[in-house]
Amino acid sequence: MLDRAAIRLRNTRALFAEFVRSTVAVHAAGDVKGLDRLFAEHLGIAPSYWSQLKSGERQIGEKLARQFESLAGKPDGWLDELHDTVRAAAPPPPEPSLPVNADERFAVGLFLTAYRLNPQAVKQRLLAALDAELLKARPVPRR
């Protein structure tokens, strides 16, 4: 059985999943950035505090639970109860074409910096590099 802190965290994560779905529905997927920051602002807390709550470093107390419920349009006590919908709630997976981690964001940033300096040359080099990688991946035909 989950304790109250675990139930509140689980339900707050479900609120975050709802927030992500509604935010992505309103904005183009590429325009949505800083969802954690936006969610923290929506709940009236600092982004760093949301990060600490999300990671389990801090617990959601009584006053904060009621604040979250009020701002999320949930009835009093909602955060303290298990909900069937919460079990299935999860943020949508990222678009395959968008960077999914810090390394990929770094690589995309490097590419954009170079591309903006000299688009034609960078496109040619990237296509050549991609072609070379694809050649490596192809099995060598036997004769």
Image (cartoon, grey):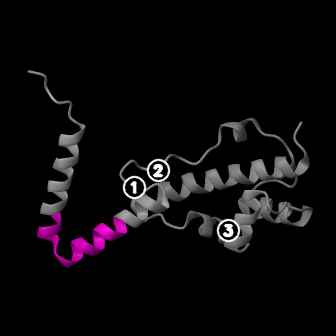
Q: Tell me if 110 is positioned left or right of 24 in this view.
A: left
Q: Position of residue 79 (x, y in %)?
A: 82, 51
- The answer to whether 51 appears left or right of 126 in the picture is right
- The kind of secondary structure element at disc 3 is helix
Q: Which residue is mark 3?
A: 40
Tell me the residue at 20%/51% (across/down). Answer: 130
In terms of sequence position, does the residue under pointer 1 or pointer 3 come before the other? 3
Q: Is residue 114 magenta?
A: yes
Seen in the picture, residue 85 relative to 35 is either above or below; the reply is above
**Tag shown at residue 98:** 1
- The amino acid pointed to by label 2 is Pro
Q: CA distance from mark 3 to mark 2?
A: 20 Å
Observer-side mark, 1 or 3, equals 1
Please, what is the three-letter code of the amino acid marked with disc 1?
Leu
**Secondary structure category for the residue under label 2:** loop
Is 1 situated left or right of 112 in this image?
A: right
Residue 75: which disc? Answer: none
Q: In whole angstroms, how far apart are the C-alphas of marks 2 and 1?
A: 7 Å
Residue extent of the magenta highlight: 108-123
Cβ atoms under marks 2 and 1 closer than 8 Å: yes
x then y, percent, for residue 129 = 19, 55
Report which residue position mark 2 lands on: 94
Q: Residue at x 76, y 49 (%)?
A: 11
Q: Quadrant of residue 87?
A: top right
Q: Is residue 28 visible?
A: no
Q: Nearer the viewer, residue 69 or 120?
A: 120
Any magenta on residue 62?
Answer: no
Give, as a three-letter code, the residue at label 3.
Answer: Ala
